[in-house]
Image (tube, helix red, strand yellow):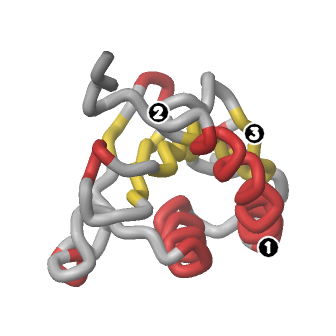
Amino acid sequence: MTKRLLDPSPARAAAYVALYPLLQQVAKRHGYALAVHGSLHRDFDLIAVPWIDEASDPLTLIKAIKRATRTVTHHEETDHLTKDCAPNLKPHGRIAYSLHFTNSGMYGGYLDISVIPKKKRRDL
């Protein structure tokens, strides 16, 4: 029996869970609460929600997570060309970022982080 190419190892979920405390510390330092959602099977789905008025902007948070985890947006040799970490706009204003642990894109593990942009108090 051959294993499908895209079928990740069950150990990937354990690695993601072990990484969570580091990610949570970075998020907290930038004024965000961090929540896990999804199956942890293929990727590590996270939601970052601004928790304080002085929370960093989403890109600053993502760049801090990228530095702390040594992840790449596309490939280590070309990431310097993508200054904004290639965000994707999602429903309800979420901004999604994919940060890969390898240069193999979707064939390696990655963080799939949706950031809720902060709102000014007058917008509430």
The answer for how far apart the CA atoms under marks 2 and 3 are is: 17 Å
Locate residue 121 relative to residue 47 in the image: left or right.
right
Locate residue 40 relative to residue 111 in the image: left or right.
right
Q: Quadrant of the N terminus?
A: top left
Q: Is residue 40 above or below residue 83?
A: above
Q: How many marks?
A: 3
- Can residue 116 be seen in the rendering of this structure? no
Q: Which amino acid, by three-letter code, is at mark 1?
A: Arg
Judged from the image, the secondary structure of the residue bearing numbered disc 1 is helix
Judged from the image, the secondary structure of the residue bearing numbered disc 2 is loop
Residue 123, disc: none
Which residue appears at 48% of the width and 43% of the height? 112
Q: Is residue 72 above or below residue 95?
A: below
Which residue appears at 75% of the width and 39% of the height? 35
Q: Looking at the image, tell me whether mark 1 or mark 3 is earlier in sequence order.
A: 1
Residue identified by numbered label 3 = 35
Q: Are marks 2 and 3 in contact (CB under 8 Å)?
A: no
In this rendered view, identify the residue nearer to me: 70 or 123.
Answer: 70
Which residue appears at 62% of the width and 42% of the height? 11
Q: What is the x, y in percent for residue 45? A: 57, 37
For disc 1, the neighbor class at 10 Å (few under 14, some 14 to 19, many from 20) is some
Residue identified by numbered label 2 = 42
Q: Which amino acid, by three-letter code, is at mark 3?
A: Ala
Q: Looking at the image, tell me whether mark 2 or mark 3 is earlier in sequence order.
A: 3
Q: Are marks 1 and 3 in contact (CB under 8 Å)?
A: no
Q: Is residue 54 above or below residue 80?
A: above
Locate residue 104 relative to residue 101 in the image: left or right.
left
Q: Looking at the image, tell me whether mark 2 or mark 1 is earlier in sequence order.
A: 1
Judged from the image, the secondary structure of the residue bearing numbered disc 3 is strand
Q: Which amino acid, by three-letter code, is at mark 2?
A: Arg
Residue identified by numbered label 1 = 29
